[in-house]
Amino acid sequence: MTVQELPGAAAYRPAPPPAWKPLTDPAPLLPDPEPYRVLGTDAVADADPELLLRLYAELVRGRRYNAQATALTKQGRLAVYPSSTGQEACEIAAALVLEERDWLFPSYRDTLAAVARGLDPAEALTLLRGDRHTGYDPRAHRIAPLCTPLATQLPHAVGLAHAARLKGDDVVALAMVGDGGTSEGDFHEALNFAAVWRAPVVFLVQNNGFAISVPLAKQTAAPSLAHKAVGYGMPGRLVDGNDAAAVHQVLSEAVERARSGGGPTLVEAVTYRMDAHTNADDATRYRGAGEVDLWRDHDPVLLLERELTGRGLLDDAGREEARASAERMAAQLRERMNADPVLDPMSLFTHVYEEQTAQLREQAARLREELDAENDQHGTDGGAAR
């Protein structure tokens, strides 16, 4: 006898257990249908003029930093450089919204964010030059190592933020990732754990249109990347990534929400990568010059410069001062990067484990023998190489 044949089967209405019901109301978690903007809207009247001027100075400096680093790759002083030209508003805002006690978790393209947070411009390029594993002390700067594997820094950010909350530390972690990184498993695992634990994390997705050569439409069918947030139980925010004031405001609100115990937020900043993926990429193979030209009219530096000029907050002298400061930074960077580094090959074994394993000791001894033999043959210092 089947269920349908039992007496009273017509009144049988199986209901799922209560656990199926949503834990949160999804409506407040959904992003706005259009990216949030400040510049050129009524909202700009509430923006702090001093903040706008600081954002402008940092944007100009960042644009010059990207140009100088790109030039260094052409001169053979850097092995590779993933430029963030066109994305400076995201980079600068991410750095400025954090307190000193907070942590930044950058990806490989977020060198500028690390510099804007206070990292030495030359130290930020050490990894890309191939001189060191990282090039700076993450603890001293509260900046995790620049992460080349896609999205692997996101679970680390969640773990640090969750641990800080358990210890009672008032710390927020801001993790940066590109649109390509949202297709990695680490992205989804990080968002799920962060939402369940209500970890004080802000996820910033810089949607620059391409994962190297793969356009966003071939990665996801979601209405936006910000919509992915609701599936994990956190708010999704959509912002114009070239509007520095808007990105700063949205990230500030997300950081404050995280710090006050409100849990994580996923922010999608819609921006554009003006340069190639890296100096090894030929972007003309997958996008046309007309597309790039359209985005040049929405350049983050020009958008803010026009706003400041129109409000009488920036004149020719102010523009020249910002550019001169950026040029001094570029000159110092160029001078330092043009000097050949003195490297000790034995340092490869220094920071692998707190206590070296037997295998590492064996490898270190073998390298020492090879260096000593080379020293005997050429009469050079085998402990350091240029």
Image (cartoon, rainbow, N blue to C red):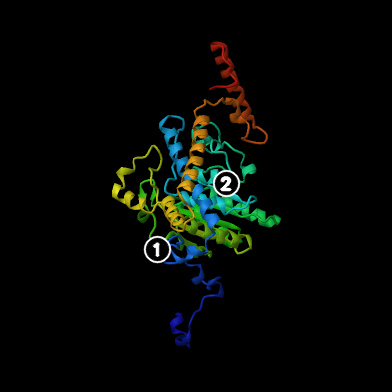
Horizontal and vertical percent for residue 288? 29, 47
What residue is at 46 percent from the left and 33 percent from the top? 78
Question: Judging from the image, what secondary structure is the residue with disc 2 in?
Answer: loop
- Is residue 11 in sight in this rendering? yes
Dot placed on the residue nearer the N-terminal end, 1 or 2: 2
Callout 2: 10 Å neighbours few (<14), some, many (20+)?
many
State whether residue 371 is above or below residue 125: above
Is 90 left, or right, of 367 in this rendering? left
State whether residue 328 is above or below residue 308: above
Which amino acid lies under the numbered mark 2 shown in the image of this protein? Arg
Q: Nearer the viewer, residue 3 or 126?
A: 126
Which callout, 1 or 2, points to the residue nearer the camera? Answer: 2
Q: Nearer the viewer, residue 337 or 32?
A: 337
Quarter of the image where the N terminus is located: bottom left
What residue is at 52 percent from the left and 63 percent from the top? 232
Question: Judging from the image, what secondary structure is the residue with disc 1 in?
Answer: loop
Q: Dot 1 corresponds to which residue?
A: 223
Numbered circles on residues, count: 2
Horizontal and vertical percent for residue 274? 38, 46
Horizontal and vertical percent for residue 379? 56, 11
- Is residue 61 in sight in this rendering? no
State whether residue 80 is above or below residue 232: above
Horizontal and vertical percent for residue 100? 64, 50
Residue 362 lies in what quarter of the image?
top right
What residue is at 64 percent from the left and 54 percent from the top? 171
How far, Cα to Cα, is label 1 from label 2? 32 Å
Q: Dot 2 corresponds to which residue?
A: 117
Which amino acid lies under the numbered mark 1 shown in the image of this protein? Pro
